[in-house]
Structures are given as structure tokens and as C-alpha cells.
Image (spheres, helix red, strand yellow):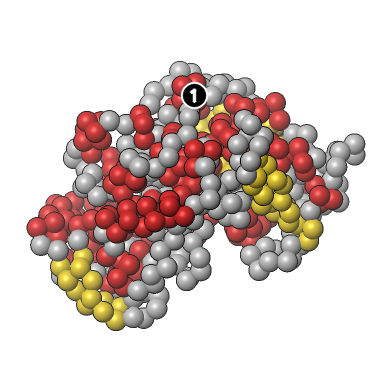
């Protein structure tokens, strides 16, 4: 899940949150590839099939503007492939799935052996009538963009859209998705959703659950989450876990003592007097100066906490920032940025969040949930302000009720996730009688990015049930070791799996689910 006003590149580990799979059709059905053509674009594998399905923007009237939904199918490798595909639902909200086809093919190659993989750009994303709003500035100046700058850009984009932004909500998009399923000739499907894709998956389960054999929800963002209300608190939780793990590791604690107090002082100093420093653009090599503010630092730290391998650098870079050296932090902000166009349609993101979440957040709740967080004043503010003028679709009150279908569901959470922490997965799983919730220790946003997670996903899809699912590999997953020297981690420390992590993972894996739950 990304942050509209805090925009940063999607890191490779987050690639998982967005996708769709489709299996071979039964003999009395249309073969999916019969409706498509071999792909010719550079973003797709050479053996993939591409096409589109036209739907009305206004599904209620079936009149007016139409949208071509962009579809990519990665065909199964076996000639006798299973008839039920795996549909991967993209994250964000705002990510287009099709652009990720090459990465998805590599990550889920074992799934691809027996089942097609289908990727569909949700309406408003990718090549499905995208609601893009991209800043073309590739200079150092972009790092210092203010909230006012971002709002002005959003208003400019809003004025130029040829779309009814009230019609890009999740419920409408999941009816689109079922049209794609039918168009491709699939009777039943499996679904994988990561981050916002879990919300889309839950909505699809509610609206079209009779078409789902099994579901994976990875990094759960349910319909009642009220984005971005809890984000400052949950980012602070992830930071607190990092600092606690550093303190519990002898080499890290000796090298970076009192890290929490030092970071708070650094943030306070930048709030009082922002620092203008000479830097080099991490990607282009441009030399110049930027004014480092507490807001910029908060956004960089929040984004880095998504990926533990990147956040292992945070203690070292805080120490360098204390000395007014912010070059390393800017490099973290640029991870994954190769100069290619962004795969994030911010207009669609706002159309979802401003309709489904923002109306249920009061200013008082926002202040309360931000108390005690270093990030409370800086994160998601642009998004909240944008919702004041963004067109809002209609959302039925029943949308926020828990989904209670009996479909076998694998729920996965990263223990260190700063945006969809395990409490959301636990709450969601308690309402799903056939669900199993796994918390992956030492892992950030989405647990399926680990080798263990991919193995569990493959076994679950093969079996179609959580009964007797082998999750023993979870005990071996740990946080990447912290950098304590310029060369990297102390070779004598090993990993940083704390006693907290190992016991938390075991409790989550062994604990039965399906009972009434609580909210984060």
C-alpha cells in the first residue's frame, strides 16, 4: 500500500502486492488464450498473451463512456494444466498489474507450472483508462516538494481527467474482474491479493465467492481500515520494533545506543531549523543542495520500513544524519527508481480512498491516533487534504461489514509491516471459518515475498485447503542483520531474530482462527 502524498518508488519486495492468475479452461469452455493475442510489448514475457475487455464506466446504466480493461495471461507450462487459475490482485491502490508480468512470472514460476497466471489492470490503472498524475521533475528539487506543491499538481490532474471519478471504487472494479473471468472462460479461480489487493480480494469474495476455489490475502487492508487513520501509529510500531531489535543485538546496541532518543532529537532539530545540505542525486548524479526537513525524513523512514533488508541501514543512517550527512537517506528514498514511468495511478488511489475511507475519519480521531508518533504530523497529509475536493463515489454501509465466506483462505502478515500489521490479518481471519493466519517473523509489508512464504502459497494452492498445511519454515525466517560497519553487518552476530519474533510466529501459526475478532 502506497501513500499518495508521500510518493516513493515501489520496492522489489513489494512487487507481490498486485496480481491475477487464470488456469486452463475445461473442455466445454473457451480457452483463455483464444480470446487474446501473443504480447508484443517489452514489459511482458515473450510467451504471454495480451488483450482487453470493454466494460461500461457506469455499470449501473450500461451507457456512456467505456473502458478497455487491459489483460495479460501467462499460460501454464504443462499441457494438462489445472482448470482453475490464480488471479493476482494489484496493490496500491493504484498499481497496474500488467506491467509487473515479468516479475510475477519469475516469483511465481512454481505456480505457473500447473496454472495460468492472469494479470488485469484494474479500472483507472495501468492501461485500463489510467488516472495518472505523475510529476515529470527528475531533479533534486523533487525531493523537497512541499505538500502545497503536491496538492497543486493533484488539482491540475483532476481538471484534465476524462472520467467520472465516482465510478472507480473497489466494488465496481470487482464486478469488472468477474466479467474478465467469464470472458476468458474460467469457471472457478483462485485469487492472490497483496496489500490493497487484499481489500479487492475480500470484496470479490463477497460479491462473487461462488467462483473462488481458494484465496490468499497477504498484508491485509480490509474494508473497515479507514486509510490512512492508523498509518502514523503503525509506522511508529514498526520503528519501535526495529529499535528494540537493535538494542537486543549486542553489536547494533554498542554501535548505536539510545537510538530512539537520538532520532527524536534529530526530528525535533529539523522541525526547528531545517538543514540545507549539499547532495548528489542518487540516480542521475546531479549535484546540488536540498533543504532537509522533518517531513522529508519521516517520509523516507516510513517508506524504508516496508522492507527489512533496507531498514537494516536505518541505525547507521540516523547516525550520519546527526552529522548533517543525508546522502544515504536520499539513496534509500530512491530504491527501485530506474527512471521508468511510475506504475502508480494516483487518481485511482484517491478515488478509492476518498470514497471508501476518508468519509469515516474525523479530525479528532486523526489527532488521537497520531499521539506519540514521530510520524503523526507528516504522513498522508496531502492525501487527506486532497479528499476535501476529490469527487466521491457512493459506498453502501454493508461494504464495511466483515466478509464471512467459508472459502479456504490463507491469511498472511509480516510481523514488521508498517502499514498492514498482523492485527488486521487476525481480525479478518477470525471472520473466515476456513482461514489460517500466518505471521512471518522478521518480515515487512507482505509475507509472500520470502522463500518460505512462496513455498506455503504454492502448497496451499495445490491443496486448496489450509488443513495440514506445512508452515514449519516460518520458524527459520528472521530480520536481516543490521549494518554496524561500512562493510555491512558484523559477521559474528548472525541474524537478528529476537525471542519476541520466534514466539510470535509460533503462536500465530498454531492458533486456530475463525472466532469473532477485534479491530486494530
Q: Quadrant of residue 107?
A: bottom right
Along the line of sight, which residue is nearer the eye, 321 or 316?
Answer: 321
Q: Quadrant of residue 424?
A: top left
Residue 371 spot, x, y in % from top left: 19, 37
- Note whether 172 is above or below 119 in the view shown: above
Residue at 48%, 30% in the rendered image: 394
How many numbered marks does the figure carry?
Answer: 1
Residue lying furthest right: 27
Judging from the image, what secondary structure is the residue with disc 1 in?
A: loop
Residue 388 spot, x, y in % from top left: 33, 40
Residue at 67%, 34% in the rendered image: 62
Along the line of sight, which residue is nearer the eye, 488 or 180?
Answer: 180
Residue 435 spot, x, y in % from top left: 56, 28
Residue at 53%, 38% in the rendered image: 167
Q: Is residue 232 visible?
A: yes
| Quarter of the figure with the C terminus | top left
Q: Residues within 10 Å of mark 1 (few under 14, many from 20)?
A: few
Q: Which residue is mark 1?
A: 396
For residue 491, side relative to residue 338 (left or right)? left
Residue at 46%, 65% in the rendered image: 336
- Note whether 207 is above or below 49 in the view shown: above
For residue 428, side relative to residue 83 (left or right)? left
Along the line of sight, which residue is nearer the eye, 494 or 485?
Answer: 485
Amino acid at each position: 500500500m502506497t501513500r499518495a502524498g508521500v510518493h516513493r518508488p515501489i520496492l522489489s519486495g513489494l512487487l507481490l502486492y498486485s496480481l491475477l492468475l487464470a488456469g486452463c479452461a475445461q473442455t466445454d469452455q473457451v480457452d483463455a488464450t483464444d480470446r487474446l493475442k501473443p504480447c508484443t510489448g517489452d514489459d511482458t514475457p515473450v510467451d504471454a498473451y495480451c488483450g482487453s475487455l470493454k466494460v461500461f464506466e457506469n455499470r449501473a446504466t450500461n451507457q456512456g463512456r467505456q473502458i478497455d480493461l487491459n489483460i495479460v495471461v501467462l499460460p501454464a507450462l504443462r499441457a494438462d494444466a489445472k482448470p482453475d487459475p490464480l488471479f493476482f490482485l494489484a496493490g496500491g491502490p493504484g498499481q497496474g498489474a500488467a506491467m509487473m508480468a515479468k516479475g510475477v512470472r519469475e516469483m511465481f514460476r512454481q505456480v505457473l507450472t500447473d496454472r495460468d497466471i492472469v494479470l488485469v489492470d484494474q479500472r483507472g490503472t495501468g492501461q485500463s483508462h489510467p488516472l495518472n498524475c505523475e510529476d515529470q521533475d527528475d531533479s533534486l528539487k523533487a525531493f523537497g516538494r512541499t505538500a502545497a506543491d503536491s496538492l497543486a499538481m493533484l488539482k491540475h490532474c483532476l481538471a484534465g481527467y476524462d472520467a467520472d471519478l465516482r465510478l472507480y471504487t473497489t466494488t465496481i472494479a470487482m464486478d469488472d474482474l468477474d466479467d474478465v473471468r467469464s470472458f476468458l472462460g474460467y469457471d472457478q479461480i483462485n485469487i492472490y491479493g497483496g496489500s490493497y489487493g487484499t481489500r479487492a480480494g475480500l470484496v470479490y469474495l463477497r460479491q462473487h465467492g461462488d467462483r473462488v476455489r481458494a484465496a490468499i490475502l497477504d498484508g491485509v487492508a480490509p474494508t473497515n481500515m479507514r486509510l490512512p487513520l492508523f498509518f502514523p501509529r503503525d509506522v511508529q510500531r514498526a520503528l519501535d520494533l526495529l529499535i528494540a531489535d537493535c538494542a537486543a543485538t549486542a553489536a547494533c546496541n554498542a554501535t548505536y545506543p539510545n537510538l530512539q532518543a537520538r532520532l527524536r532529537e534529530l526530528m525535533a532539530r529539523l522541525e526547528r531549523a531545517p538543514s540545507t545540505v549539499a547532495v548528489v542525486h542518487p540516480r542521475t548524479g546531479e549535484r546540488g543542495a536540498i533543504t532537509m526537513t522533518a517531513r522529508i525524513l519521516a517520509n523516507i523512514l516510513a517508506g524504508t520500513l516496508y522492507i527489512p533488508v533496507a531498514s537494516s541501514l536505518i541505525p547507521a543512517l540516523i547516525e550520519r544524519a546527526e552529522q548533517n550527512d543525508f546522502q544515504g537517506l536520499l539513496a534509500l528514498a530512491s530504491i527501485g527508481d530506474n527512471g521508468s514511468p511510475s506504475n502508480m495511478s494516483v487518481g485511482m488511489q484517491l478515488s478509492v480512498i476518498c470514497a471508501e475511507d476518508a468519509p469515516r475519519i474525523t479530525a479528532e480521531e486523526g489527532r488521537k491516533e497520531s499521539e506519540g508518533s514521530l510520524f503523526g504530523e507528516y504522513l498522508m497529509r496531502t492525501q487527506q487534504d486532497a479528499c476535501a475536493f476529490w469527487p466521491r463515489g457512493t459506498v453502501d454501509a454493508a461494504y464495511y461489514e466483515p466478509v464471512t465466506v467459508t472459502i479456504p483462505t490463507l491469511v498472511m502478515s509480516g510481523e514488521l509491516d508498517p502499514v498492514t500489521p498482523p492485527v488486521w490479518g487476525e481480525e479478518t481471519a477470525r471472520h473466515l471459518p476456513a482461514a489460517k493466519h500466518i505471521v512471518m517473523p522478521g518480515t515487512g509489508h507482505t509475507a509472500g515475498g520470502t522463500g518460505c512464504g512462496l513455498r506455503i502459497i504454492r502448497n496451499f494452492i495445490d491443496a486448496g485447503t489450509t488443513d495440514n498445511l506445512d508452515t514449519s519454515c516460518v520458524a527459520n525466517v528472521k530480520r536481516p542483520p543490521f549494518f554496524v560497519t561500512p562493510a555491512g553487518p558484523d559477521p559474528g552476530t548472525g541474524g537478528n531474530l529476537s525471542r519476541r519474533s520466534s514466539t510470535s510466529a509460533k503462536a500465530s501459526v498454531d492458533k486456530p482462527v475463525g472466532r469473532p475478532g477485534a479491530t486494530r
